[in-house]
Amino acid sequence: MVELADIFRRHGPAYRARFGERMLPGHLNAMRAIEQCRTAALGGQVYTCPQCGESRYVYHSCRDRHCPKCQNANAQEWLVAQHDLLLPTAYFMLTFTLPAALRDLARSNQRLFYDLLFRASAQAAQALARDPRFCGGQLGLVGVLHTWGRNLAFHPHVHYLVPAGAVAADGHTWLPVQHANFLLPVKALSRIFRAKFRDALRASDCFAQIPAAVWQQPWVVHCQPVGDGWHALKYLAPYIFRVAISNARILKLENGRVTFRYRSSDTQRTTFCTLPAEEFIHRFLQHVLPKGFVKVRYYGFFAPALRPRLAAVRQQLEGSPACVPVPAPPQTAPLCPSCGRPMLRCSGTPPVDMAGDVPGASLEPVQEARPP
């Protein structure tokens, strides 16, 4: 099976030789991390099974947030950590999308536009939710930024997971939504979102470069119910730790060209795309986030400073975190391939040069080990 790391290892040197002087440090770092993930370059650990004596060498993972091999375990860890945010009520998914006319400018000013996308969308949702015709109070929102479309095109948007209700102005009374399948009117939400984004952007040098027509066209906002409590969090977790493309979608690397599959938004059918390796790498790297950028954000009564409101809401809804199933923490040690028991770490080996000998070569490398 072809992996993203294989494409980077084979075609990354030529890509860096051509564009390296113009590449952002974050792009170079992401490429290096993905290339080295679970290889001798990061070192590893020797594990032994206490039951049958089987030994295995396990490479360390890179833990880079753009690496497709490292994100599944992160999603499980996040689910465990978010357990205290669960409420025994229905949830909605709100999605705000940056219009196509702004995307070229956003690509060149990522930190500014991504921050404004978060801020304007959250403010728009809260402003409309305060209207007594809808929620009549403050929402709780957990948001995650995505920057890609299914074909790796640049397509910035934010997904929010939102409980089906709001906290009243008194700071503790829970106000459930009036209709099970309706949270907020998306057309009105779109207009407020557009206006708040425009007003916030006026203070930047970018505003003068934007065609006036952008502020007249409809902006895309979508809202859908996604189930109750724990199911809603499980629905969101893959969104939070999804990367631009998974290894499972990459089908082949032949003659300097990469073929991958995706589901068409128009027809919902599986579609295949073949790109020169250089173009494929370019498309992937445009989704590497600025260093230190926070891609998961909490608003309203989910904000850390307002967690007492969340506790009051949970009491009113007569729910308890203890009543909600919690997944087991991710397995940090490999399982023995012979007897299935957890293996014990015996010793570690330092990183080596990619061209050097693999440490522990007499043992078979398997699975991942997290750096201690």
Image (spheres, grey):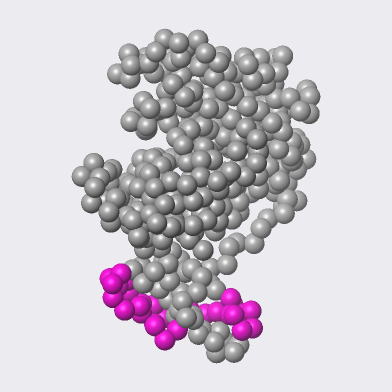
Residue 113 placement (x, y as % from top left): 40, 28
Question: Does the magenta segment cover residue 355?
Answer: yes
Residue at the image point whose x is 55% and y is 36% from the top? 143
Q: Residue furthest front?
A: 255
Depth check: give the residue in front, 57 or 233.
57
Residue 318 placement (x, y as % from top left): 78, 40
Q: Is residue 362 above or below residue 7?
A: below
Q: Is residue 33 above or below residue 345?
A: above
Question: Does the magenta segment cover residue 316?
Answer: no
Residue at the image point whose x is 75% and y is 51% from the top? 323
Q: Is residue 169 above or below residue 346?
A: above
Q: Is residue 341 above or below residue 322?
A: below
Residue 130 placement (x, y as % from top left): 63, 18
Residue at the image point whose x is 50% and y is 10% from the top? 216
Q: Would residue 338 be found to the left or right of residue 278 on screen? A: right
Q: Residue furthest bottom?
A: 53
Q: Would residue 112 be found to the left or right of residue 297 on screen? A: left
Number of on-image labels: 0
Q: Majority secondary structure of the magenta segment?
A: loop
Depth check: give the residue in front, 323 or 61.
61
Depth check: give the residue in front, 174 or 240.
240
**What residue span does the magenta drawing correspond to?**
335-363
